[in-house]
Image (cartoon, rainbow, N blue to C red):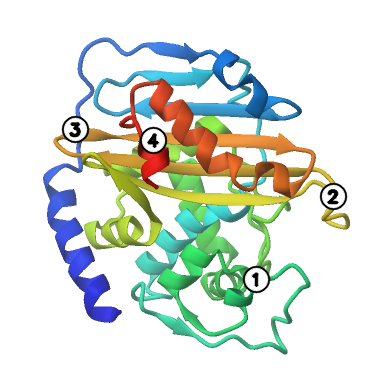
């Protein structure tokens, strides 16, 4: 596991070093994606989607999107959380192991079995294990988060001291546009994140590939009423496409739905369909992954 991850990261550092700065060519435009082709999928949902092609600078917006409304990031915050943990040395690598303390972090009824065990940072990211990142949050501390998130322009950067759940429907809020801006600044080197850390994120967030394009993303979701997990939910799919010989694409999708089941698979699937509609992802990307 360790050797495989280290080899992947070494290769990605080399690739990242060659293309940390992506010049935007031509005159950037905003293009609107019609909802007609997805009317059945969108029924009963409120969806906002924004993507940016870092090659051309063009934006692609789903018709009817509210890309400036701030929402809780939920587990999409694991992207900046992972970056901060690695940069601060709280978790030196994706192989950083933590034991699960069942007394300190008792399992909730909705926990998947994969959360109920010790794991590495990389595994916790892919499994979206909340307790692992809550432990990191207490070690990192509110002042470090506030400084980093304010510097990075990540939403409202509202992180109270001593909290370990500020991204879970609590104080931290971010919009679709801000998610996309954050990822653009990250991939273009504006955030000052090291090549090693960025390569580690590439490995941890790998979510599929097809025709020379690799998908990197993170889901997130939570109940609008914390006391009612059977009620309405909000969710995200946030990420980027790395393309051979071309600059990446960054994107974010937010959806409000009547239940978790209504958005669980749709977030990723609809994001890929919209990226294909925009000509940003290769045809068949969804089918291949």
Q: CA distance from mark 3 to mark 2?
A: 42 Å
* Of the pair 203 and 81, the residue shown nearer to us: 203
The tag earlier along the polypeptide, 4 or 1, is 1
The residue where tag 3 is placed is: 246
Identify the residue at horizontal 30%, vertical 79% (top origin): 1
* Of the pair 178 and 37, the residue shown nearer to us: 37
Identify the residue at horizontal 80%, vertical 46% (top origin): 224
* SS for dot 1: loop
* Of the pair 108 and 28, the residue shown nearer to us: 108
* SS for dot 3: strand
Residues at badges 4 and 1 in contact (C-beta under 8 Å)? Answer: no
Residues at badges 2 and 1 in contact (C-beta under 8 Å)? Answer: no
Tell me: residue 284, above or below residue 27. Answer: below
Residue 43 image position (x, y, % from top left): 72, 25
Residues at badges 4 and 2 in contact (C-beta under 8 Å)? Answer: no
Q: Is residue 30 visible?
A: yes
Q: Is residue 154 visible?
A: no
The residue where tag 1 is placed is: 112
Judge depth for marks 2 and 1 and give the one in front. Answer: 1
Tell me: residue 235, above or below residue 122. Answer: above
Residue 66 image position (x, y, % from top left): 63, 23
Judge depth for marks 4 and 1 and give the one in front. Answer: 1
- Residue extending furthest right? 227
Q: CA distance from mark 1 to mark 3?
A: 38 Å
The residue where tag 2 is placed is: 225
- The image quadrant of residue 25 is top left
The tag earlier along the polypeptide, 1 or 3, is 1
The residue where tag 4 is placed is: 250
* SS for dot 4: strand
């Amino acid at each position: 596991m360790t050797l495989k991850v280290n080899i992947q990261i070494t290769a990605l550092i080399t690739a990242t070093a060659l293309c940390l700065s992506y010049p935007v060519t031509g005159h950037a435009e905003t293009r609107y994606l019609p909802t007609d082709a997805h009317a059945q999928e969108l029924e009963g949902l409120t969806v906002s989607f924004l993507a940016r092609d870092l090659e051309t600078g063009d934006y692609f917006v789903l018709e009817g999107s509210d890309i400036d409304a701030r929402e809780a990031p939920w587990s999409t915050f694991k992207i900046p959380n992972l970056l901060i943990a690695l940069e601060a040395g709280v978790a030196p690598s994706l192989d950083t192991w933590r034991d699960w303390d069942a007394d300190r972090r008792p399992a909730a009824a909705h926990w998947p079995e994969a959360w109920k065990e010790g794991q590495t940072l990389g595994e916790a990211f892919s499994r979206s294990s909340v307790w692992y990142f809550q432990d990191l949050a207490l070690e990192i501390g509110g002042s470090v988060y506030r400084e980093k998130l304010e510097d990075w322009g990540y939403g409202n950067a509202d992180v109270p001291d001593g909290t370990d759940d500020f991204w879970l429907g609590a104080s931290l809020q971010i919009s679709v546009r801000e998610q996309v801006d954050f990822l653009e600044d990250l991939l273009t080197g504006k955030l000052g994140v090291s090549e090693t850390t960025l390569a580690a994120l590439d490995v941890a967030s790998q979510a599929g590939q097809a025709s020379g394009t690799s998908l990197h993303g993170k889901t997130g979701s939570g109940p609008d009423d914390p006391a009612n997990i059977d009620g309405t939910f909000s969710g995200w799919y946030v990420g980027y496409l790395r393309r051979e010989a071309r600059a990446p694409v960054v994107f974010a999708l937010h959806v409000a739905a009547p239940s978790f089941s209504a958005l669980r698979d749709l977030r990723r699937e609809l994001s890929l369909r919209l990226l294909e509609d925009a000509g940003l992802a290769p045809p068949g990307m969804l089918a291949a992954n």
